Image: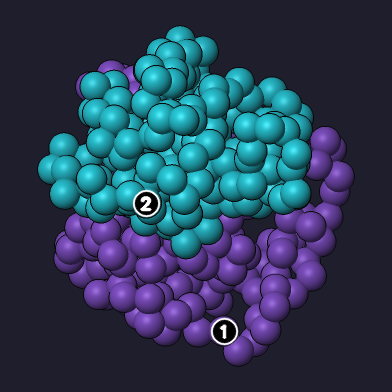
Chain colours: A cyan, B purple
Amino acid sequence: MAELSPARILAELKNNGATHVVWLPDSETNFLYVLMSEEPSIDLVPVSREGHAFSTAAGLAAGGKKPVILIQNTGMMESGDSLRGWGLGMNVPVVMMVGYRGWTRHGVINDTAAFYTERFLHAFNINYYLVESDEDADRISIAFAEAQREKRPVAVLVGDEYHGFNVSR
Amino acid sequence: MMKTAEMLEIFNKHRGDAVVIPGRGGRFWVEMSDQPDRDLPLGDPAMGGHASFALGLALAIPDQRVVLFDSEGDVLMGMGALPTIAEKAPSNLYHFMLDNGVYATTGGQPVPNAEQMEYDVVAQGCGYPSTYAIDNLEDFASQIEEILSGPGPVFVALKIDPEIINEPINARPQWQRKTRNQAVADMQAELGISGG
């Protein structure tokens, strides 16, 4: 199966005018960090707890910027109240790229992080798009357009743990 | 110890054209501010997030001074925001923190280790280049101009009197004059910002 290349992800962020990436490292998006840190058009804002990502993004959006949140599904679930109050409550049009730890295509899930991920998004009524390979990457642009149109967070689930994002190319 | 309203009255004389996020001081601030379109009285969207919100706003509008009145309960809940603020180091961010030692809006229960905490030391340890601890109005009045005239990020721990609220949330007076989204929209219009 084709893999998801960090360069393609970065291109999607740039094409959609992302100004800031508010992030906390995870195993799905490891290599993307290297590319982003070398990209002058994007400012990285590192947080130490995923809930801060939503309030930071709310502030950036209030100031007219276009942030992207880059976190793991575990941290997204820890961030529930911040997503509620800052993300949804302030109508922040932000794409949240979420590393889908534990996700498998065949459907046998042994990681509770993956088991609860989509259930969590359903509970918060957050729409989401699954991106596993470069062929899916244009869904990121769909998410950006939807976030802007609906004035609310939209998720992109990155289902490529320890594959393309960690392979230097 | 200071009364929040009295402290804010003094700050208001030195505000200039700063964008103000009054945080837990919002119910007092909306009564005295004469630039409501530069105010973001958001109330409490989700506890622990004010500092990160202010950081994001300060990064987005670097030509504007951003003043936040945070609380010690929020800082304790979101203490991990302090190193991020220190790393990004927005020179336009002035981070005041109201420390009354208690969770005043839930009946006045003490915050963890309330008597021992030195929040200015915490902020300094997280990398804020400039920190203050002030526990009376006279010192606040004499230092506020210096604080606001220097570069940020600045952290100012303020000892204030607990003004405890012990009513059910739905029974409390509604002090906000705008919705959160309207406050943001008004600020964006005032500053000429197109929506994010």
Q: Dot 1: within a 10 Å radius of its alpha carbon, few (fewer than 14), some, or many (20 or more) residues?
A: some
Determine which of the numbered discs, if any, sits on residue B117 in the image.
Answer: 1
Q: Quadrant of the C terminus of chain B?
A: top left
Label 1 is placed on what type of residue? Met
Residue B135 visible (yes or no): no
Question: What whole-number distance in Å separates the C-alpha atoms at marks 1 and 2?
Answer: 42 Å
Q: Nearer the viewer, residue B93 or B145?
A: B93
Q: Which residue is mark 2?
A: A166
Mark 2 residue type? Asn
Would residue B115 be visible to someone looking at this image? yes
Q: Residue B107 has which mark? A: none
The relative height of residue B36 versus residue A125 in the rendered view (above or below) is below
Task: Give x and y (percent) for residue A47.
Answer: 43, 57
State the residue at coordinates (43%, 56%).
Answer: A25
Q: Which marked residue is nearer to the observer: mark 1 or mark 2? A: 2
Q: Where's residue A71, x and y in %?
A: 49, 46
Output the chain of dot 1: B
Q: Nearer the viewer, residue B72 or B9?
A: B72
Residue at position x 50%, y 36% from top?
A: A158
